[in-house]
Amino acid sequence: MPPIEDLSVDLWVPLTLMAAFMQNLRSSLQKSLQPELGTRGATYVRFLFGVPVALFGLLLLTTGRGEDLPAIQPRFLLYCVLGGTSQILGTAALLSSFESRNYAAGIAYSKTEPLLAALFGLVILGERVPFGGLGAIALGLVAVLVLTVGREAFRPTLWGRLFTDRGALLGMCAGAAFALAAVFYRGAGLDLATGDFLLRSIFTLTCVLIFQVLLMTLEICVRDPDMLRKVAGCWRRGSLVGLVGATASAGWFGASLLQNAAYVRAFGQVELLFAIGSSLIFFRERLKRREIVGIILLIAALLLLLLD
């Protein structure tokens, strides 16, 4: 089996595009469940109904190709636990930010994630991002901020408020948690000694989801047992969230095994372009000048990432 680094690095780009598109859809579906289940329940649904999807994918890979499951090392388990916990906290913070401001702003604030992933990747995995890559990531962050204020009237206090109100802080906490999760997941997949990138990513995803479900089930049984009944009542929509969420996670996991997590999460900002496209097509909204500038900057940042 060739090492992961010998595989075509171009494959991480379509994987990231697929993951970003599915994540945008998953976030919308989760938001629709939030009034009924609250932040905890909407977070739990994503992981609970994602486990059968991941197990089915793992079964197809192992039986269809006749491969054995990768051997588990202690560091792999540690990375899965740390990454799974970070993702739970990040998802809860992101959903809470929706309540404080709005859906688009919460998504935008969480996009501080790529710069933080570069920092965490250096500290945890010893992976460096070249100056060109850091510049592209920084440009992407500026583009996200411009898009965030695109529909607000300009005031001297506007930019300061972006980083001080509760929604902003929750969104940035979500970005930090997601950055940690991305780095830990990359570390977990790379720590496996056998299997190609696809088997490693699906196996890591399955282990993480099982841990997340066990952790959240224990927490819900202690603090809010009635939540299990509410979640069971939403099984149809929950199953769709699980399918879409597990597909998005599989894309993120696979891409992160082929490329530095900071690059993957930065290129994942294309999710905002999907959201804007949906607004233009389905809601007939018109773009303002600042939004057009933000889109141009974001496209430039994505192109720079591909050329770096």
Image: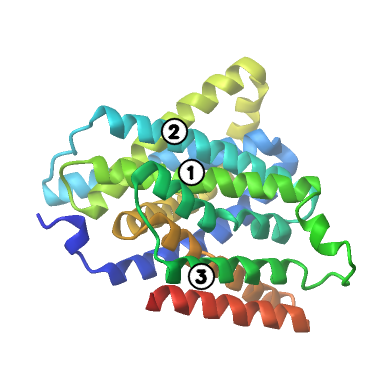
Q: Amino acid at mark 2?
A: Leu
Q: Amino acid at mark 3?
A: Gly
Residue corresponding to mark 3: 135
Mark 3 residue crowding within 10 angstroms, few (<14) / some (14–19) / many (20+): some
Residue 191 in picture, x, y percent from top left: 25, 41
Q: Residue at (72%, 59%) from the top-left corner?
A: 105
Q: Quadrant of residue 90?
A: top right
Q: Residue at (13%, 40%) from the top-left corner?
A: 68
Q: Earlier in the sequence, mark 3 or mark 2?
A: 2
Q: Secondary structure at mark 1?
A: helix
Q: Earlier in the sequence, mark 1 or mark 3?
A: 3
Q: Amino acid at mark 1?
A: Leu
Q: Is residue 54 visible?
A: no
Residue 106 in picture, x, y percent from top left: 69, 54
Residue corresponding to mark 2: 82
| Residue 17 versus residue 112 in the image, above or below | below
- Is the C-beta separation of discs 1 and 2 under 8 Å? yes
Q: Secondary structure at mark 2?
A: helix
Q: Which mark is residue 180?
A: 1
Q: Residue at (88%, 72%) from the top-left corner?
A: 153
